[in-house]
């Protein structure tokens, strides 16, 4: 019953924060200047004492129990350039954050290895990827929000949380956002949101309290994985309006915890009604919070990761689901 020493990368900061709630030591690779993907223990996130900065020039000097890859370059290039032969022989997990990009149904996953566990973050992603002979498992998201933050909804407008929306275009729904924003009062936040007239980035720790003032969250994304911002909004009691695509079709109960549809006109009318009717927004938000607590609790998330780590390493892992 011991904590594991896990080598990984800083690929998605908010996901890494939730992953490190599991009772293990995480060594996060960093490079000078901390470029994207190699930030190590950096930024404004309140990392725990179990998160360790791991400079790439020192990584071969350390012993680990497992490697968690999160990107193709890490698996195809970094492990051969940065790690020793003994480290490359360690148990491996590949954490796939996204659905297939080049083709939604026929794209083969780049990992084709029966000795690697491929972890998908949604059942939709697992359904769409052709994972070949690689063993797969789904570990759904788990999130934490500050216990003193609760939905207020006093601002008569919706909130959209997407990074680099202008650059990422149609797939992330830039055109849908623009059309909806012309019909309903919406505020865009996220990295480079100012390029589309938005407010810019809100730090992860501050986002729940910031979002709590808005009447609802709108998700215009056509095709991506399940966004953590949506789950975090649900967890504080915020209703969600979204396209009925990808995993969201199983997360939002239409008319109960929010509204989902593939028709933008229908969603616009739903958003207008929420602006007019704060009592309805509170009712939907309360159901969204219950749904998020049941499905995306951090305890279940950590237990699922403990089970995966135990299976790949053959090690009895710590039972607790809280930070070291």
Image (cartoon, rainbow, N blue to C red):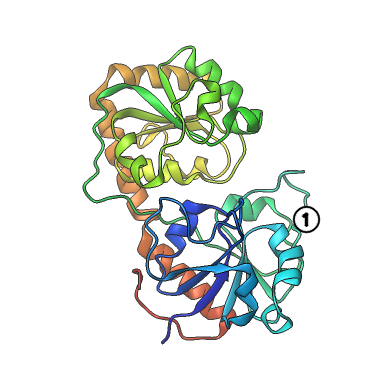
Secondary structure beneath label 1: loop
Q: Residue at x 50, y 53 (%)?
A: 13
Q: Is residue 278 left or right of residue 57?
A: left
Q: Is residue 263 visible?
A: no
Q: Residue furthest front?
A: 32
Residue 60 against residue 30 in the figure, above or below: below
Quadrant location of the C terminus? bottom left
Specify the quadrant of the image occupied by residue 230. top left
From the image, tell me which residue sits under label 1.
108
Specify the quadrant of the image occupied by residue 245. top right
Q: Position of residue 134 (x, y in %)?
A: 71, 68
Q: Position of residue 293 (x, y in %)?
A: 33, 52
Which of 208/311 is in front? 208
Question: Total number of numbered labels?
Answer: 1
Q: Position of residue 253 (x, y in %)?
A: 41, 39
Q: Residue furthest top?
A: 183
Residue 23 against residue 48 in the figure, above or below: below
Q: Residue at x 62, y 50 (%)?
A: 98
Residue 299 against residue 249 in the figure, above or below: below
Q: Is residue 1 visible?
A: yes
Residue 303 against residue 286 in the figure, above or below: below
Q: Is residue 56 left or right of residue 16?
A: right
Which of 56/119 is in front? 56
Q: Position of residue 223 (x, y in %)?
A: 62, 38
Q: Is residue 114 left or right of residue 221?
A: right
């Amino acid at each position: 019953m011991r904590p594991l020493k896990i080598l990984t990368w800083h690929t998605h900061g908010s996901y890494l924060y939730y992953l490190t709630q599991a009772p293990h030591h995480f060594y996060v690779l960093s490079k000078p200047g901390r470029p994207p993907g190699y930030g190590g223990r950096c930024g404004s996130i309140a990392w725990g004492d179990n998160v360790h900065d791991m400079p790439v020039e020192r990584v071969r000097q350390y012993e680990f129990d497992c490697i968690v890859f999160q990107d193709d370059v890490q698996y195809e290039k970094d492990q051969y350039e940065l790690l020793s032969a003994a480290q490359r022989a360690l148990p491996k997990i590949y954490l796939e954050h996204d659905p297939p990009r080049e083709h939604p149904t026929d794209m083969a996953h780049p990992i084709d290895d029966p000795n690697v566990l491929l972890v998908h973050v949604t059942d939709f992603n697992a359904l769409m990827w052709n994972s070949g002979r690689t063993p797969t498992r789904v570990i759904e998201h788990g999130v934490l929000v500050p216990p003193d933050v609760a939905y207020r909804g006093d601002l008569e407008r919706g909130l959209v949380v997407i990074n680099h929306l202008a650059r990422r275009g149609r797939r992330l729904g830039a055109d849908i956002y623009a059309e909806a924003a012309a019909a309903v009062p919406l505020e865009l936040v996220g990295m480079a949101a100012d390029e589309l007239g938005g407010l810019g980035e809100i730090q992860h720790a501050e986002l729940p309290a910031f979002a709590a003032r808005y009447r609802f969250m709108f998700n215009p994304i056509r095709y991506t994985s399940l966004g953590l911002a949506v789950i975090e909004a649900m967890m504080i009691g915020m209703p969600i309006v979204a396209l009925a695509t990808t995993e969201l079709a199983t997360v939002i109960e239409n008319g109960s915890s929010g509204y989902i549809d593939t028709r933008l006109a229908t969603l616009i009318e739903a958003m207008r009604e929420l602006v007019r009717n704060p009592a309805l927004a509170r009712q939907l938000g309360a159901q969204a919070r219950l749904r998020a607590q049941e499905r995306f609790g951090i305890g279940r998330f950590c237990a699922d990761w403990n089970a995966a780590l135990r299976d790949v390493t053959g090690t009895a892992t710590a039972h607790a689901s809280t930070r070291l």
